[in-house]
Image (cartoon, coloured by chain):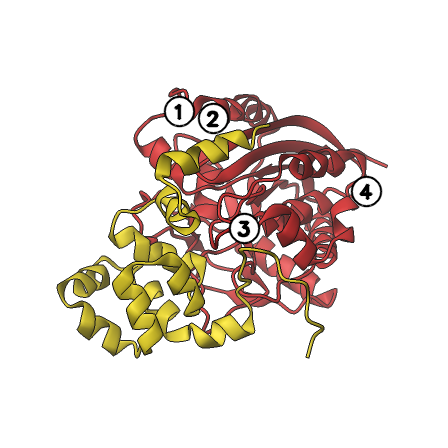
């Protein structure tokens, strides 16, 4: 085993442990590269999640459309972006949701990084 | 022999694709970013590359977690973009360069890089957007060779390892028969983080120091571990690995021809650099 590294606050590295935990969820999200699969998800969300074998934690995070829960359930940002795309959410929407800000507050914080 | 004429490093934020499709280049939000490419395109018109070696990272279009190569090199006659799931418009296909692809593969494996080779390969926004920024008419005047570095699943290759990969690419191109004029493009970064409570993280001081280092002290960033780079630049800021590999391909000394930096594009500190090799 490698030496544990100090945690970075507010950050989950998508490592082997996450990749193992999130495989089914990420595989479902990867399928959303295809429009037909996005439509199938919208037509019958339960059946679509069942087809990929999501566990209860993953199913609940999908139901809640909650990015932090999806990450906790093993989701990877790049595949989750394809899930978010189904609902027309952009990266500021996702950033705002994860940081508990409004979208305008989140965008203002980005601009403030100019210093 | 072939010659590397320069390296261009740029961010590849997906929102750029939407801005191009909606022709927002002159809107106040976008203008500072797109204006950075004007001098780069002027340089391209003079430099006339005929091949691009594109060092980039796939975001779940071509590769899934079932098979996740650390380093992958394309060896396909053509590379297509495709639906990425969240609505980015697709661009015309890119012509490959099979001779250079296999020459690179022979050379890099000969230098102990264990590659995955791809005779079929989709290329995502990290490849297509830089091409569309360099050639806005999307009538690509170059053949292409994709070099993909894993930044999806940790462990990632170290900065020092990506530097050595870039050096090896430089040596391989220099030994490629013919007189091809090769442009290296490295895409990604600069600082940004999409996921977690730290989403929105940007580190201007580090980015500017990194950009300066690429001409002044190009191995500077190789002192950092991947963990340190994530801490300093964000979970996606670590894409500066592609910049390092592209810079390394130029050899020991390089001259900065152009640089621009703008905060923010989407959630990202957007950087652009053009470097030329300096003969030692």
Q: Counting residues from the N terminus, which is met first, the one under dot 2 or under dot 3?
A: 2
At numbered mark 4, what does the secondary structure look like: helix, strand or loop?
Answer: loop
Q: Disc 2 and disc 1: Cα gap in Å? A: 6 Å
The hue in which chain A appears in the rendered picture of the protein: yellow
Mark number, residue B252 = 4
Q: Counting residues from the N terminus, which is met first, the one under dot 3 or under dot 1?
A: 1
Are the residues flagged by discs 2 and 1 from a single subunit? Answer: yes
In the rendered image, the vertical position of residue B47 relative to residue A78, given as above or below: above
Mark number, residue A60 = none
Pinpoint the chain carrying mark 2.
B
The hue in which chain B appears in the rendered picture of the protein: red
Q: Which residue is mark 1?
A: B25
Mark number, residue B34 = 2
Q: Are marks 2 and 1 in contact (CB under 8 Å)?
A: yes
Q: Counting residues from the N terminus, which is met first, the one under dot 4 or under dot 3?
A: 3
Q: Counting residues from the N terminus, which is met first, the one under dot 4 or under dot 1?
A: 1
**Image quadrant occupied by the C terminus of chain B:** top right
Q: Which residue is mark 3?
A: B236
**Does residue A96 appear to the left or right of B208 in the view shown?**
left
Pinpoint the chain carrying mark 1.
B
Q: Residues within 10 Å of mark 3 (few under 14, many from 20)?
A: many
Q: Disc 4 and disc 2: Cα gap in Å? A: 30 Å
Of labels 4 and 1, the one closer to you: 1
């Amino acid at each position: 085993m490698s030496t544990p590294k100090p945690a970075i606050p507010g950050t989950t590295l998508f490592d082997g442990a996450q990749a193992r935990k999130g495989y089914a969820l990420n595989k479902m999200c990867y399928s959303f590269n295809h429009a037909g699969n996005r439509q199938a998800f919208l037509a019958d969300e339960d059946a679509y999640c069942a087809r990929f074998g999501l566990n209860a934690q993953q199913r609940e995070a999908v139901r809640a459309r909650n990015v932090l829960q999806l990450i906790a359930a093993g989701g990877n940002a790049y595949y989750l972006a394809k899930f978010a795309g189904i609902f027309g959410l952009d990266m500021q929407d996702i950033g705002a949701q994860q940081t508990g800000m409004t979208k305008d507050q989140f965008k203002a914080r980005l601009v403030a990084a100019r210093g | 022999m072939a010659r590397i004429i320069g390296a261009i490093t740029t961010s590849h934020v997906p929102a750029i694709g939407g801005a191009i499709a909606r022709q927002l280049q002159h809107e106040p939000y976008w203008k500072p970013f797109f204006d950075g490419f004007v001098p780069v395109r002027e340089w391209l018109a003079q430099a006339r590359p005929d091949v691009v070696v594109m060092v980039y990272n796939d975001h779940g279009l071509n590769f899934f977690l079932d098979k996740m190569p650390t380093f992958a090199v394309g060896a396909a006659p053509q590379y297509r973009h495709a639906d990425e799931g969240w609505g980015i418009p697709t661009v015309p296909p890119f012509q490959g360069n099979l001779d250079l692809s296999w020459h690179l593969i022979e050379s890099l494996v000969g230098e102990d890089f264990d590659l995955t080779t791809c005779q079929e390969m989709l290329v995502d926004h990290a490849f297509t957007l830089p091409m569309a920024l360099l050639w806005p008419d999307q009538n690509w005047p170059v053949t292409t060779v994709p070099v993909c570095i894993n930044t999806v699943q940790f462990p990632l290759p170290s900065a020092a390892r990506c530097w050595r990969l870039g050096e090896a690419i430089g040596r391989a191109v220099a030994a490629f028969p013919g007189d091809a004029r090769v442009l290296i493009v490295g895409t990604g970064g600069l600082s940004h983080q999409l996921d977690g409570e730290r989403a929105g993280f940007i580190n201007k001081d580090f980015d500017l120091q990194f950009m300066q280092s690429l001409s002044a002290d190009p191995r500077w960033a190789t002192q950092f571990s991947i963990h340190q780079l994530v801490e300093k630049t964000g979970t996606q800021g670590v894409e500066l690995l592609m910049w390092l590999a592209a810079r390394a391909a130029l050899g020991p000394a390089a001259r900065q021809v152009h640089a621009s930096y703008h905060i923010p594009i989407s959630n990202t500190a957007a950087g652009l650099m053009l470097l030329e090799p300096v003969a030692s």
